Amino acid sequence: MSMTYLSYLKVPELLSLQERRSQPEEHDEMLFIVIHQAYELWFKQILHELEAMRRALVEGSVWEAMRLMRRTLTILKVLVHQVDILETMTPLSFNQFRSFLADSSGFQSVQFRELEILCGVHTRGALAMHPEGSAPHQQLLARMEEQTLWEAFCAFLRSQGLEMPTPERDLSQAPIHPPTEAAQEVLLKVMREREEASLLCELLVDFDEGLQEWRYRHVKMVERTIGHKPGTGGSAGVGYLLKTLHRPVFPDLWAIRNKL
């Protein structure tokens, strides 16, 4: 059989995955499913891009790293715009099928937790969402053993002859890499003297800002839909999400703004 558009993209299989649980079927549940499945596909692509970016940093390919980050930033904008679509669903409409979600919760998204871990946000709470020994639990544990983006970036700067200290890991906080004066002194030198590396610094700040923007739009969407009620699956809902706002993943790059 020859390859076709339908067979290459597995369109029939893809379109069979939107199964509404509400009885009778609620119209807006289809939108809810499609949006969140699309999020998971974009999370997969972001992880794919950031893993490649990490490899580019290890290889010293700064322009390739920047190209991959620019693509990631564009994807983040798509994630933000998808919130606009989801907000066309009213709270009353969502409540028509919310009970059918049972114990499922966005907090259980393994890929988004992987993204956080790759950025240096190692939360033990993410592990607690999945039974010990389960495939998601093992997947997150394996991700925690990997080099973070910040560690890869710092190693890249050292490969360029800069005395960038090796980041410490403090698993009691998020992000796990505490900001340091020593790192900021090197970053100031980068911003003033290393044009290519300074452009990469700014792209990392763009990514950090884009991630915070998506968090903000997400928490406001949740707040306007369910208020401050607990989330599905026993999650804390808006209360937890608010704690994640204004929490940069690359604090050293923000701290030097006061010193430039």
Image (cartoon, rainbow, N blue to C red):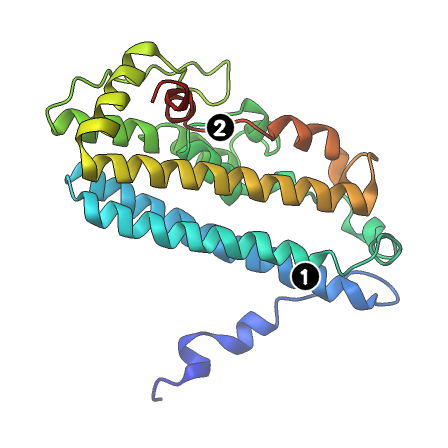
Q: Residue at x 28, y 52 (%)?
A: 67
For marks 1 and 2, the one nearer the N-term is: 1
Q: Position of residue 36 (x, y in %)?
A: 62, 55
**Of 29 and 218, which appears nearest the observer?**
218
Name the residue carrying label 1.
85
Q: Which residue is mark 2?
A: 248
Badge 2 element: loop
Q: What's the distance in space between the residues labelled 1 and 2, CA to CA? A: 26 Å
259 left or right, relative to 175: left
As drawn, the residue found furthest toward the front would be 260
The quadrant in which residue 18 appears is: bottom right
Residue at left offset 16%, top offset 24%: 158
Q: Amino acid at mark 1?
A: Ile
Q: Residue at x 38, y 16 (%)?
A: 169
Q: Is residue 31 above or below residue 47?
A: below
- Residue 71 picture location, percent across and down: 37, 55
